[in-house]
Image (tube, rainbow, N blue to C red):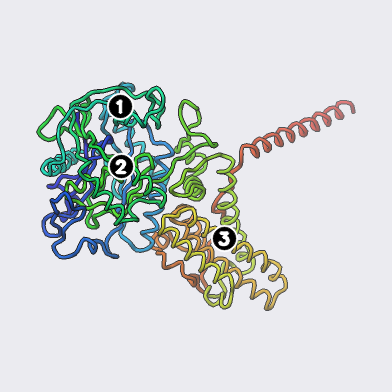
Amino acid sequence: MAVRLHYSSLQNTLFSSFSPMYSFNPSKPFLLYPLLSRQNLISLSQSKDSFFCTCTNNTAQNLQTESDPFVFTTPLYYVNAPPHMGSAYTTVAADAIARFQRLLGKKVIFITGTDEHGEKIATAAATNGSSPRDHCDVVSNAYKLLWKDLDITYGKFIRTTDPKHEAIVKEFCARVLANGDMYRADYEGFYCVNCEEYKDEKELLENKLCPMHLKPCVPRKEDNYFFALSKYQKKLEETLTENPEFVQPSFRPNEVQNWIKSGLKDFSISRASVDWGIPVPNDKNQTIYETSDLQSTVSSGWPASLHLIGKDILRFHAVYWPAMLASAGLAIPKKVFGHGFLTKDGMKMGKSLGNTLEPNDLVCEFGSDAVRYFFLKEVEFGHDGDYSEDRFINIVNAHLANTIGNLLNRTLGLLRKNCQLTLVADSATAAEGNSLKDTVENLVEKARVHYENLSLSSACEAVIEIGNAGNLYMDEQAPWSNFKKGGAASEAAAKDLVIILEAMRIIAIALSPVTPSLCLRIYEQLGYSKDQFYAATWSETKWGGLKLGQVMAQPNPVFARIESPAEGEQAAEGALKATKTKTKTKNTKHQEVAQA
């Protein structure tokens, strides 16, 4: 059996100063994180008691500075089946985080990809009548196409079948072997094919069912390689105590601590019965497990700033992964964030229930902005969240079509009618002593803090509150009425439009991590170019961007209201009735003519 790690070889890295390193993930396939070059920048401690790098010129704490890139990963998604909404949710959240960090001026290295080895994949390929390689090519490409449709701006897409990856996996294995933490032994237990891991009997449900997949685990006995996790019991306990921010959100560390305190057992990191994997060094009969979260070769910034995962693989990445990094003398990531699950109409999704949620279908029907906004706004990041079509449509219409889209459209409509789409004042001058300016500044600062804390739902809420404040201001000031009065009232109304449009400009930047395409359309309506939008930074959320004489674009709705199924049926019924009435009237006239 073989384990596969993905990454460029030491001889062929993307950046000459870096060489990627990987680590094993227990019953998940083996994976490696990238690492600073060992040539001049870093020397790696080989002590199994150390979780940190030893730098030649700086302390480990100073290894990352404000100028260093923000490096983070999603899981590497398993290609036994096409992408589902859970995978899309993680990646959309990751993209929002990446876009926000770019707004802060950070260089972002956003890594995602696909995990392409293991028994499930070989089985899925055989079921479809294809080779594992062909199967992986098709499904991996499906991920790339979906990420494009969802406006995902990843920097590196990793495939664990990349030939360059195997050399790094073997080197990592060699480090662990040299440290005395990898040994061969027989293993017997109950194995879940879907999880690709052995389960403790105390974890299993009645009839030996996997608690995750609700399918029977099968008894197996194998001659495998093990990682000596038990040796790192104390060090892991110390790590969690000394790094309280390591596992997030804040309620997850207790779960990890309980796993560790219950006593860590050595775990199998290879399989003798699976051919679709990377051979263990010096043992071609064994293949290594691959971790599904790999870190790509980067030009700077190890350890990684953030690793996003689903809560179902938290144990692998918050317990097993740090221990293996320690064995190889590498630093742990700064933060591991385990988000929750998605349900549909209050029920767990599954093909057998016929209630799966296909991301491709959602994007095709509603567009990427609607999908991104709903899941980031309505699911508190880190917690479980539910999808229902009615709620989806109501939220998206209320926030994007009405609060934002309608406010922009009617403001520009008044500007076109009364000011020839030209601003009569700088936004800073127009808002002197104006309470809306203070409200917007407070809310945009709240949004910034929420983004930094990965509270994506709260960040969305703060930005939408800017739109609510703008709508309230519009209704209170009633500029349409003041324009009719002329004189000073008309001048004040023209300035009110500048103030509202300035709020819209700030919304376009502050909400762009979540709804990038919508925000681009808003920015273009305000007279800016696409290049100016992509060059904008968070500092430009400061009030005062719009200037005297600036010309806005012709008003055009930036977000079309979504018609609910009920509305569609009502419209169809109305059209049918109108057709019947028209036909009846026409027939009556024909009868009258005939009688005449």
Q: Residue at x 46, y 66 (%)?
A: 541
Q: What distance separates the C-alpha of mark 2 from that of mark 3?
A: 36 Å
Of 577 and 66, the residue lying toward us: 66
Which corner quadrant holds the N terminus? Answer: top left
Residue 147 screen position, x and y as percent: 38, 43
Secondary element type, mark 2: strand
Instruction: Name the mark on residue 113.
Output: 2
Q: Which residue is mark 3?
A: 467
Q: Residue at x 26, y 32 (%)?
A: 117
Q: Which residue is mark 1?
A: 191
Discs 2, 3 touching: Cβ within 8 Å: no
In the shown orientation, is residue 158 left or right of residue 96?
A: left
**Would you place residue 322 above or below residue 56 in this image?**
above
Of 249 and 587, the residue lying toward us: 249
Residue 22 screen position, x and y as percent: 21, 44
- Do we see residue 154 in this rendering? no
In the shown orientation, is residue 309 left or right of residue 226?
A: right
In the shown orientation, is residue 345 left or right of residue 382?
A: right
